[in-house]
């Protein structure tokens, strides 16, 4: 039987919230003094203010050589902790992770590069860390630079790079310096769409052509489905599913709340700055009842209620619509209409309307969002938090529609000319 290139057995990571984490054992001299002086006054005496939090628990699976494995889960599920352990950035509390080969990791913008060194110098530094000789790195240099498209800035210190430039070079280095195992976290989301597609193609080539192993975390479920042979779904630090992409993605999406009026104020899986919070989504389809079911071709209205703690000028609102595999289908945003709401604070509500919903019958998901003026950054973005169904309208034409032919129906006019 072939030995797996990655073997993870009973892996667990315990953090103590409220207590500083460090690799060294025992308190510093300063901490000892503080403890000695505070104990008589009741602080730290017979009392531990920290709380235990298992970021990972009982995680076990193998990865074969040349396999591409995706890891998905809501925010806080343990994905990044798992990858930090595999990358030897942090140690596990229990269990083991055995990697039989050189590892290149791309976990977050800034990891692995020295900000004061130039792009060229960092390429050689990363290669040396991977155990490559200077001659081997020089042989790959032209490929790395060409792929990254940052040749003009190669001799500029990377601290002056934009986040997009940084990721371009970092991914190119990690992918071209011939590691046996490539570990990539959500960091690719920083790049533009064309570069993301380029990176996905490279990862596919690394696996299929070069026989190297890839582990990949992403919230882009379409990319996970397209690239990975197996997908591991983590929930609260434990494996829920590890298997075929459709099975794991289906379980992941099943957490979304189905209903005509859904509270999303406490939805954990979100990107937020705290400047705004989407608290409720209400769908107003034609059918009565508590479950949101919209007939194909009917109007769809979605009301979004938002809490804005401090005054905010002309925010933008949007709604992403995904199919049952997590592929984004529709991008509905107030910016297209140039909706100006002025300076707002407190609780406000906005409504969008689709005059004729052309989605084919099936199960769909919503990700609402609010961004600042100019749409430069997301203020709140709860991901895939609401689900709804589209049913056939009952016409003979609808009965012939099949998702194999497309995602949605667009009315058209035909004539003989």
Image (spheres, rainbow, N blue to C red):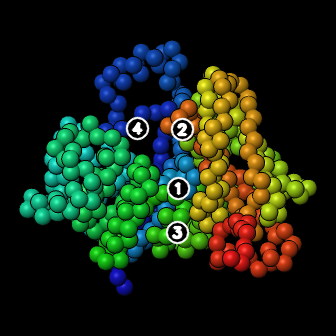
Indicate whether 320 appears above or below 206.
Answer: above
The residue that label 1 is drawn on is: 219
Image point (20%, 47%), residue name: 152
Q: Earlier in the sequence, mark 2 or mark 1?
A: 1
Single out the mark in the foreground, 1 or 4: 1
Q: Residues within 10 Å of mark 1 (few under 14, many from 20)?
A: some
Q: Is residue 88 left or right of residue 221?
A: left
Labelled pair 2, 1 in contact (Cβ < 8 Å)? no
Mark 2–mark 3 distance (CA, rounded to whole Å): 29 Å
Q: Is residue 282 left or right of residue 417?
A: right
Query: Can residue 280 be seen from the camera position used here?
Result: no
**Residue furthest to the right:** 288
Single out the mark in the foreground, 3 or 4: 3
The residue that label 3 is drawn on is: 225
Image point (49%, 24%), residue name: 44
Query: Can residue 22 be seen from the camera position used here?
Result: yes
Image point (42%, 48%), residue name: 190
Could you tell me which secondary element the residue under label 2 belongs to? helix
Mark 3–mark 4 distance (CA, rounded to whole Å): 36 Å
Labelled pair 3, 1 in contact (Cβ < 8 Å)? no
Q: Earlier in the sequence, mark 3 or mark 1?
A: 1
Q: Which mark is residue 21?
A: 4
**Residue furthest to the left:** 135
x and y, in percent, of residue 32 in the image: 36, 23
Indicate whether 57 appears above or below 122.
Answer: below
The residue that label 2 is drawn on is: 375
């Amino acid at each position: 039987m072939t030995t797996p290139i990655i073997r993870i057995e009973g892996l667990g990571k315990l953090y103590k919230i409220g207590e500083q984490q460090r690799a060294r054992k025992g308190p510093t001299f300063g901490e000892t003094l503080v403890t000695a002086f505070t104990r008589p006054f009741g602080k730290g005496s017979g009392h531990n203010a920290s709380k235990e939090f298992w970021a990972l628990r009982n995680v076990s699976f193998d990865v074969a050589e040349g396999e591409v494995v995706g890891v998905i889960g809501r925010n806080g599920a343990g994905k990044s902790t798992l990858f930090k352990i595999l990358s030897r950035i942090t140690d596990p509390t229990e269990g083991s992770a055995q990697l039989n080969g050189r590892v290149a990791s791309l976990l977050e913008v800034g990891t692995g590069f020295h900000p004061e060194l130039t792009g060229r110098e960092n390429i050689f530094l990363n290669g040396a860390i991977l155990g490559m000789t200077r001659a081997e790195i020089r042989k790959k240099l032209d490929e790395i630079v060409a792929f990254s498209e940052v040749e003009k800035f190669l001799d500029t210190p990377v601290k002056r790079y934009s986040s997009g430039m940084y990721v371009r070079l970092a991914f190119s280095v990690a992918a071209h310096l011939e590691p046996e195992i490539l570990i990539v976290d959500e960091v690719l989301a920083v790049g533009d769409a064309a570069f993301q597609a380029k990176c996905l193609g490279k990862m596919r080539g690394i696996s299929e052509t070069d026989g190297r192993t890839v582990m990949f975390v992403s919230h882009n479920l379409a990319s996970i489905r397209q690239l990975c042979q197996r997908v591991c779904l983590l929930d609260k630090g434990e494996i829920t599913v590890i298997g075929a992409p459709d099975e794991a993605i289906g379980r992941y999406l099943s957490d979304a709340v189905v209903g005509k009026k859904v509270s999303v104020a406490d939805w954990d899986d979100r990107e937020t700055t705290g400047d705004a919070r989407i608290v409720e989504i209400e769908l107003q389809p034609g059918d009565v009842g508590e479950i949101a079911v919209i007939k194909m071709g009917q109007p769809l209205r979605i009301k979004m209620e938002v809490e804005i703690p401090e005054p905010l000028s002309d925010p933008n609102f949007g709604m992403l619509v995904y199919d049952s595999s997590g592929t984004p289908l529709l991008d509905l945003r107030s910016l297209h209409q140039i909706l100006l709401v002025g300076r707002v604070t407190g609780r406000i509500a906005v409504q969008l309307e689709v005059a004729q919903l052309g989605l084919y019958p099936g199960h769909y998901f919503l990700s609402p969002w609010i961004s600042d003026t100019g749409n430069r950054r997301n203020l709140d973005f709860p991901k895939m938090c609401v689900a709804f169904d589209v049913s056939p309208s009952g016409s003979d034409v609808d009965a012939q529609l099949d998702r194999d032919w497309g995602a949605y129906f667009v009315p058209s006019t035909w004539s003989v000319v």
